[in-house]
Each structure stands twice: as C-alpha cells, then as structure tokens.
Image (spheres, rainbow, N blue to C red):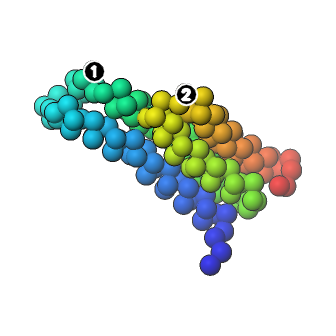
C-alpha cells in the first residue's frame, strides 16, 4: 500500500498532535514521585525533579510549535503539494519533535536546539512550497 503525500501530511498532523502529550507522560510520573496534589496541580511545578520541569517545558513547547506546523501542513494539503520534499518535510518535523522532547527531558541542549531548528525548517519548507504553488511561481 502506497501512501500519498496528502495522506502523509494528514498523518503527520495527527502524529504531531499526539506527540504533544508524550512529555506529559513524564510530567505525570514526576508528579507521582512528589505526591500528586490534584487541588493545586500547577503549584507542584517547583517541587518536581529537574527532569519533570524540563518535561513540562517540552510539553508547552510542543503546543507552541504544533499550531504553526499544523497551519503549514494544512496549507500544503490544500494547495495539493505532491512532492517528496513536502512529504519529507512533514515526516522530518514529526521525527525532530519527538527527538526534541527526548533531548529536552534528558537535558541535552545542543541536540534539543538542533531538533528545534530542523522542525522549524521543515515547517518553513511547507509554507514556502504552498506559497509558491498558489502564486504559480514554480512547480516543485
């Protein structure tokens, strides 16, 4: 079964949405370690171990980047992007965001920053391909 670029774009949006919650699983584990206080869950942040705090930041960053990626991927979908570059950019975003969270939680700043850059470049690629297509500048 061969996936179309359209299917890949939509699958990557769904995968990126799911990846928002990957770091939160680590946050939940850290909360259990310090004693979950469901009456004041946000007040627990300062009590979390360092990895739990980093997981919280990774979770928040995932929300921030998802919105921009989803817009770019939907633009690519709507403009009928059918290139391996578009598919590769969408897949690269998902892989980079997974690794970004892992490196954030493990406190590997250089690798985390590299993954952020790759994810941002992937999103930018989808925007550019879509804008080129609607402006009839170039067929890629």
Of labels 2 and 1, earlier in sequence is 1
Q: Residues within 10 Å of mark 1 (few under 14, many from 20)?
A: few
Question: Residue 70 location, x and y as percent?
Answer: 55, 47
Q: Quadrant of the C terminus?
A: bottom right
Q: Is residue 25 left or right of residue 133?
A: left
Farthest-out residue, right: 138
Question: Residue 62 location, x and y as percent?
Answer: 47, 38
Question: Residue 110 location, x and y as percent?
Answer: 60, 28
Question: Residue 81 location, x and y as percent?
Answer: 72, 58
Q: Please name the residue shown 49% across and 55% down the image.
A: 15
Q: Label 2, on which residue?
A: 109
Q: Is residue 57 left or right of residue 49?
A: right
Q: Label 1, on which residue?
A: 46
As drawn, 81 above or below 43: below
Q: Quadrant of the N terminus?
A: bottom right
Q: Please name the residue shown 59% across and 34% down the image.
A: 111
Q: For the residues labelled 2 and 1, say whether their Cβ atoms are less than 8 Å apart.
A: no
Farthest-out residue, bottom: 1
**Element carrying mark 1:** helix
As drawn, 86 above or below 20: below
């Amino acid at each position: 079964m061969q996936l179309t670029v359209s299917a890949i774009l939509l699958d990557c949006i769904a995968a990126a949405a799911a990846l928002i919650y990957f770091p939160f699983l680590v946050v939940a584990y850290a909360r259990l370690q310090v004693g979950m206080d469901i009456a004041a869950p946000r007040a627990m942040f300062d009590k979390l171990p360092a990895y739990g705090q980093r997981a919280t930041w990774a979770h928040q960053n995932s929300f921030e980047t998802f919105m921009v990626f989803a817009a770019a991927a939907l633009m690519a979908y709507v403009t009928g992007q059918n290139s391996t570059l578009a598919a590769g950019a969408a897949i690269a975003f998902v892989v980079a965001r997974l690794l970004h969270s892992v490196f954030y939680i493990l406190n590997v700043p250089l690798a985390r920053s590299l993954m952020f850059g790759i994810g941002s470049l992937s999103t930018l690629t989808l925007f550019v391909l879509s804008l080129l297509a609607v402006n009839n500048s170039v067929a890629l």
